[in-house]
Image (cartoon, rainbow, N blue to C red):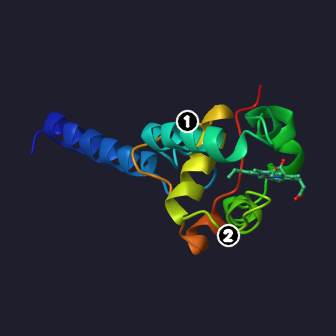
Amino acid sequence: MHFQQLMSAVIVCALLLLTGCAEKVPETSMDGIYTAAQADRGAGLFESLCARCHSVQEFSGRSFDAIWAGVPAAALYVRIANTMPLDQPGSLGIPQVTALMAHIFNENEMPAGDLPLEGDMEWLMTISLARPAH
Ligand code: HEC
C-alpha cells in the first residue's frame, strides 16, 4: 500500500468514528427528542384541553426553568398524565401527553428531531429537561 492510500484509509476511519460519535444517544431535551409534527398536534391539543386554565408561557422560559430544569422528562410526563386537565385527571392517552410535551419543548426552543417522543417511562427517566441558554 502506498503511503497516500494508507493516509486516506486512516482519514476515512477517523471520519467514520466521528460520525459514529455524532449519533449519540439523547441525554437531554436539547437532543431532538420529538418531531415538529408532534409539536403541531400538541399545540392544537393545548388549545382545546389546557388553554382555558393555562397559557403556554407558564411552561416556557424562566417559568419552565423554575420547575423543570434538570428534572427527568418522566416527571413532566407523569404530572400531565396523572393530574391534568385538573378537572379530568387521567383522561389523556399516551400520544396526547407526548404531543403536549412536544408543544412545550417547541415553545422552549428545544430542537425537534427525526423520531417522535414516546411515552416510555424508563427511557424518559434518562432524559433530563433543559432548554437553550439565552
Ligand atoms: C381546570 C383548569 C386546568 C386545566 C384544564 C388544566 N390545568 Fe394544568 N394546572 C391547573 C392548576 C390550578 C395547576 C396548579 C395547581 C396544581 O398543582 O394542581 C396546574 C398545574 C399544571 C402543571 C404543573 C405546573 C407547571 O407550571 O409546570 C402542568 C405541567 C400543567 N398544569 C399542565 C397542563 C396541561 C398540559 C393541560 C392540558 C392537558 C392542563 N394543565 C389543563 C389547572 C388546569
Cα distance, mark 2 to mark 1?
Answer: 28 Å
Q: Does dot 1 land on a helix, a strand or a loop?
A: loop
Q: Outermost residue toward the bottom?
A: 122
Label 1 CB, ligand 1: below 8 Å? no
Viewer can see residue 105: no
Viewer can see residue 114: yes
Q: Residue 126 appears in which quarter of the rendering?
A: bottom right
Q: In this figure, which residue is indicated by the disc labeled 1?
A: 111
- Residue at 59% x, 57% y is 97
Q: Does dot 2 land on a helix, a strand or a loop?
A: loop
The 10 Å Cα crowd at callout 2, few under 14, some 14 to 19, many 20 or more, is some
Up the image or down, 5 lies above or below 98; here it is above
Locate residue 125 relative to residue 52 in the image: left or right.
left
Q: Nearer the viewer, residue 109 or 101?
A: 101
Residue 13 at what x, y percent from top left? 28, 47
- Residue at 53% x, 40% y is 39
Q: Nearer the viewer, residue 69 or 95?
A: 95
Q: Outermost residue toward the right?
A: 66
- Residue at 50% x, 36% y is 40
Q: Amino acid at mark 1?
A: Pro
Q: Quadrant of the N terminus?
A: top left
Locate residue 125 relative to residue 112 in the image: left or right.
right
Residue 4 at what x, y percent from top left? 17, 33
Looking at the rendered image, the disc whose residue lies closer to the viewer, 2 or 1, is 2
